[in-house]
Image: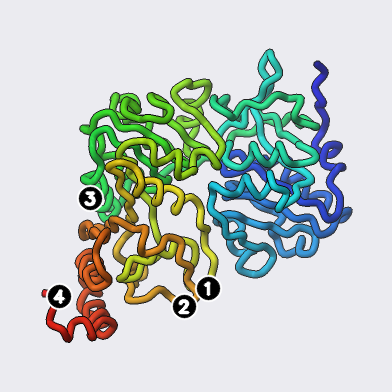
């Protein structure tokens, strides 16, 4: 079969004013296609781009392209945060598990999908590499698919394989994928990691994000046995545990023995690890993050973070007051899935205070802050000062638990504010803080 191999300039000519374009996610963002797209800025207007979190440059968000490109982020990364804050982009709140539905049901009608793939194999199949997530639904729904064919894209297995006949234009351009390297966890992060790890049981199925706190958790799981992974994303921290035989997936009921994910992000070591590795199963996010799938695995332990949490357990994870910072993501998908799993644990882990010394445990959320995870969903909250268990507790009991793990410099103030908030209950002499 003759492959439709063309230059980026020729392929991108199909994009016209008013088009809606999907951009591949995270490390798979096709930077060469993106850079060549903005070169057409004097020929097109009102082009909308839709994407999850992406790594690398996002030149379409620059002030000089206002009115030409407008980004719509399902999750806000550092590269688009300023543009969204200044009105050159928008945020779409949605559960990560439901993004594919927006494309499949034509709620968002995509004209073009820009993706990254590995070179075709002898049978004409390419791999979506590090990100399947909503991208499989996007390329199935878009009128035209343009792929940057990149030898650095690992050939991951699972549902990441697509035949080149599904691609309208193949644009060869090799470039290393965007990488991230995490420094050593701080003392605070290590303490949080140790507290979280103490909640992880042998045979548990883990969901965790990427960053220093998840890495800190993974770093102290070396003596655990037969852990499994079913997660929306993972990074380098799982590799030592696989090599040591800690991660086996022996007790998983869905995809036993496999590490299941929908995207991944890390170093070249990680990308080499997943390349043609039958241990790794990359699947669409509407499956991976489906609560009915998640709950079938045993002891699902979901570890998620937050920007702030109030003393009743409401979790803000997407904004700082009115300022949008990240997104809903898959937190609720996994928090609920873990809670419904037999022996599951839903965990929110965060430092007790910001780098400026402000308490992350507050009497009430900031004005404008969004509740991503409700007070009814949270089971555990972990800081460097310990573990608060909220499940089954009333509002006053929750406040007491959370204040115990708040930063000591803020505990007295929080106690006074909690008393003022709940004093009608305290007046009955039922509750005391001490």
Mark 1 lies on residue: 322
Mark 2 lies on residue: 367
The picture quadrant where one finds residue 149 is top right
Q: Secondary structure at mark 4?
A: loop
Left or right relative to 324: residue 83: right
Sequence-first tag of 3 and 4? 3
Q: Secondary structure at mark 1?
A: loop
- Give residue 195's mark: 3
User: Residue at the spot x=81%, y=49% of the render?
Assistant: 39
The picture quadrant where one finds residue 206 is top left
Sequence-first tag of 4 and 1? 1
Sequence-first tag of 1 and 3? 3
Q: Is residue 266 visible?
A: yes
Tell us which disc is closer to us: 4 or 1. 4
Q: CA distance from mark 4 to mark 2?
A: 27 Å
- Give residue 433's mark: 4
């Amino acid at each position: 079969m003759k492959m439709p191999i063309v230059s980026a300039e020729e392929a991108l000519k199909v994009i016209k004013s008013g088009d809606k374009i999907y951009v591949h996610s995270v490390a798979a963002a096709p930077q060469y296609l993106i850079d060549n797209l903005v070169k057409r800025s004097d020929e097109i207007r009102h082009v909308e781009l839709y994407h999850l979190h992406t790594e690398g440059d996002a030149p379409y968000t620059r002030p000089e392209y206002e009115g030409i490109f407008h980004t719509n982020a399902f999750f806000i990364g550092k590269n688009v945060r300023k543009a969204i804050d200044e009105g050159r982009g928008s945020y779409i709140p949605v559960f990560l598990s439901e993004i594919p539905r927006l494309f499949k049901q034509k709620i968002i009608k995509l004209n073009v999908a820009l993706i990254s793939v590995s070179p075709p194999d002898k049978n004409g199949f390419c791999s979506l590499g590090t990100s399947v997530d909503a991208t499989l639904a996007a390329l199935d729904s878009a009128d035209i698919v343009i792929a940057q064919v990149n030898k650095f894209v690992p050939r991951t297995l699972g549902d990441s394989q697509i035949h080149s006949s599904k691609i309208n234009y193949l644009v060869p351009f090799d470039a290393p994928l965007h990488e991230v390297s995490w420094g050593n966890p701080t003392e605070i992060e290590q303490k949080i990691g140790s507290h979280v790890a103490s909640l992880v049981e042998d045979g548990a199925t883990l969901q965790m994000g990427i960053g220093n706190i998840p890495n800190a958790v993974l770093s102290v799981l070396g003596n655990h046995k037969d852990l499994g992974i079913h997660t929306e994303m993972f990074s380098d921290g799982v590799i030592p545990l696989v090599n040591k035989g800690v991660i086996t997936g022996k007790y998983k009921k869905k995809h036993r023995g496999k590490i299941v994910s929908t995207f991944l992000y890390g170093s070249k070591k990680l990308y080499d690890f997943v390349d043609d590795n039958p241990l790794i199963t990359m699947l669409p996010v509407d499956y991976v993050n489906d609560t009915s799938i998640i709950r079938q695995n045993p002891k699902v332990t979901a570890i998620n973070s937050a920007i702030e949490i109030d003393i009743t357990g409401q979790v803000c994870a997407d904004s700082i007051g009115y300022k949008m910072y990240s997104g809903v993501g898959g937190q609720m998908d996994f928090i609920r899935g873990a809670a419904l799993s037999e022996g599951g644990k839903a965990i929110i882990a965060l430092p007790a205070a910001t780098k400026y010394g402000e308490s992350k445990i507050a009497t009430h959320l900031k004005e404008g802050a969004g509740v991503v995870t409700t007070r009814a969903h949270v089971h555990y909250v972990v800081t460097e000062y310990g573990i608060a268990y909220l499940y089954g507790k009333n509002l006053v009991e929750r406040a007491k638990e959370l204040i115990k793990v708040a930063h000591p410099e803020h505990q007295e103030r929080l106690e006074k504010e909690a008393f003022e908030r709940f004093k009608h209950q305290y007046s009955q002499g039922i509750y005391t803080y001490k």
